[in-house]
Amino acid sequence: MLNINGHIRSASDVHLTYKNRAFKYGDAIFDTLKFENNKINFIEDHYFRLLSSMRMLRMTIPMNFTMEFYEGEILKTINNSIYNENARIRVTVYRKDGGLYKPADNEINFIIEIDELVKLKYKSYEVELYKDFPIFSGTLSTIKTNNRIVNVIASIFASENDYQNCILINEKKNIVEAVNANIFLITGNEIITPALTEGCIHGIIRKKVIEMLKRDRDYKISETIVSPFELLKADEVFITNSIAEIQSVLKYRKKLYHTEKTQGLANKFKKSIEI
């Protein structure tokens, strides 16, 4: 079952036209959320990030599109789904049909999808740099638009070469993020992550981990420029997204990473969600 503009429909009854702007121009943004323990994790942060992205893309935000409305529509969709205990949620907001590059208007539609929350377990988690096409640094790259072709090609590259993920770089050859996650490097008691100005997604878990680390006296966290050479110097590397939360990276080329500090941070983070 899908939620189309507040109406619950069977997936087989949903028909998007060939004029759909998300299809024709990638004129859309999306959000991925996690539902567990009978709640949507960080719903307020997700909502305000979505609104910020809509404003940036000059979409018209309906007057009734409040946080209560947003949460209510997601919960309504979950309640009509077979995955009503733990779920992966995707919300796509796209401009209505019409126009060429210049849209006919800036009104929006939305679709809410509910899928099974699959917790993947890896025997190893090896990554490699993806260098064929860069992510361009700047504010537009920080929002989750439907234009994810670099991520798609990098995912194929990872699969073809038996990597679990790839690390994307920008036009300045600095680290940006992983294909589906933000990235952090630990060296001693210092933790670094690419700054938003490098073009990384403004991830919710990234934000929450940074907030947690700023309160932790054991670590010093910096948002900065990160060179690929730092991957070989780091003691530990981890990635973050809304589904996996905190995932240890075990190997990059010949470099093998420890995981003890990452595991401690992951446990602490998980406890903070459960409170």
Image (cartoon, grey):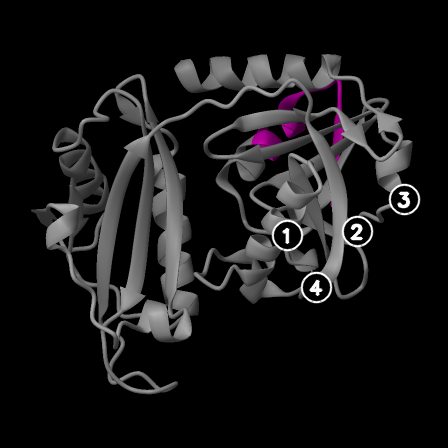
Q: Does residue 81 appear left or right of residue 119 in this picture? A: left
Measuring 51% from the left and 28% from the top, which residue is drawn there? 244
State the separation of the CA atoms marked 2 and 3: 12 Å
Give the residue displayed 72% in from the left and 31% down from the top.
126
Secondary structure beneath label 4: strand
C-alpha separation, residue under disc 3 versus residue under disc 4: 19 Å
Helix, strand or loop at mark 3: loop
Residue 171 percent location from the top left of the image: 76, 66
Badge 2: few (under 14), some or many (20 or more) residues near its Cα, within 10 Å?
A: some
**Residue 120, percent across and down?**
50, 23
Q: Mark 4 points at which residue?
A: 133
Q: Identify the residue shown where x is 40% and y is 41%.
A: 45
C-alpha span from label 2 to label 4: 19 Å
Q: What element carries label 2?
A: loop
* 252 shown above or below 223: above
Viewer-nearest of discs 2 and 1: 1
Vertical placement of residue 160 versus 92, above or below? above
Q: Tag 1, which secondary structure?
A: helix
Looking at the image, residue 17 sits to the left or right of residue 135; the answer is left
Q: Are marks 4 and 1 in contact (CB under 8 Å)?
A: yes
Give the residue at mark 2.
225
The magenta region covers 209-223
At label 1, the amino acid type is: Ala
Crowd rating for badge 1 (residues with CA inside 10 Å; few <14, some 14–19, many 20+):
many
The mark nearer the N terminus, 3 or 1, is 1
Q: Mark 1 sits on what residue?
A: 154
Q: Earlier in the sequence, mark 3 or mark 4?
A: 4
